Amino acid sequence: MKKVLSIAGSDCSGGAGIQADLKTFSAHGVFGMTVIASVVAENTFRVIEYQDVRSDIIEKQIDAVFEDIPPDAVKIGMLSCREGMLAVAKGLRRWKPANIVIDPVMYAKNGCALMNPDSIDTLIAAIVPLADLLTPNIPEAEKITGLHIQTQEDMAEAAQHIQDLGCRAVLVKGGHSTGDATDVLYDGTNFHSFSAPRIHTKNTHGTGCTYSSAIASNLALGFPLSEAVERAKAYVTTAITHAREIGKGNGPTHHFYDLYKNGLQEELR
């Protein structure tokens, strides 16, 4: 059985973060493990507060996983502070895992900040170069590059700029754009685009976490990068299409819709 590790924040309301990652891993038939970097008190409409886990505890969680159950892929989500970023970077440099997918989470769906603005330079210097794939949305890509992104051409330019920072590949997600939801992948040589009709729903809590976890799952299962992104795009689109009307704000996506309807595909068992 393939194994995937999530290093991220914990969402007590269950729609994003570690909780969304574990649901996504399970839906893909891989064994999910976690390193909790922050504990977030949030729900579908607000972030109340978060507390960062001590950097030495982050490092020990990483060591505990890798010395016993080495993952086939690693997904990294919310890293709110410099100390946590450096702890994660140290652990990854020590264990050198394959298939590192990094979602540079800066804001919750409701707009609340989940990363200290003073930590962005550390993200760029210490975390971005470790990524086999970085998956920023448009606001995050703008923050990293300083560019103003409006068109797919702008997304492609931003992807090139970010790839120049040292990561292997970049997927700029178009969920914040208009028209179809089109994402642009730059693998260092070629561009690929992935489009789906825009789904008009407010229930999109945790979509970025879900998407990046689905990509990591598919990489662990052995799919090449472009196919892993394509499969993950289809998965997250289905999850958004059948999102749950739960909570007072942005409800969660339906991580298990296809699994409930069709069972686990033979190739994933």
Image (cartoon, grey):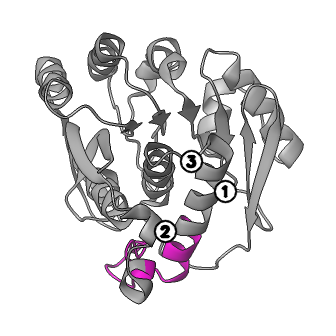
Q: Would you say residue 50 sits in the magenta stretch? A: no
Residue 250 is labelled as none
| Spot occupied by residue 98 in the image (x, y as percentages of width and height) | 44, 27
User: Which amino acid is tagged 1?
Assistant: His
Q: CA distance from mark 1 to mark 2?
A: 12 Å
Q: Is residue 234 left or right of residue 130?
A: right
The amino acid type, in three-letter code, at marker 3 is: Phe
Q: Between marks 2 and 3, how big is the CA–CA gap?
A: 26 Å
User: According to the image, label 1 marks what residue?
Assistant: 176
Pick whichever of labels 3 and 1 is earlier in the sequence. Answer: 1
Q: Name the residue rendered at 39%, 85% in the picture.
A: 245
Circle nearer the viewer, 3 or 1? 3
The numbered mark at residue 204 is: 2
> Which segment is the magenta one?
236-258
Residue 146 image position (x, y, % from top left): 70, 26
Q: Give me the residue at 34% from left, 32% from top.
A: 79
Please give the name of the residue rendered at 67% of the width and 34% of the height, measured from the top-left corner. Answer: 142
Q: What percent of the width, then of the height, locates residue 3?
A: 30, 45
Label 3, residues with CA under 10 Å away: few <14, some 14-19, many ≥20: some
Q: Amino acid at mark 2?
A: Thr
Q: Quadrant of residue 105?
A: top left
Q: Is residue 93 above or below residue 85?
A: above
Which of these two is toward me, 25 or 79?
A: 25
- Whether residue 142 is visible, yes or no, is yes
Helix, strand or loop at disc 3?
Answer: loop
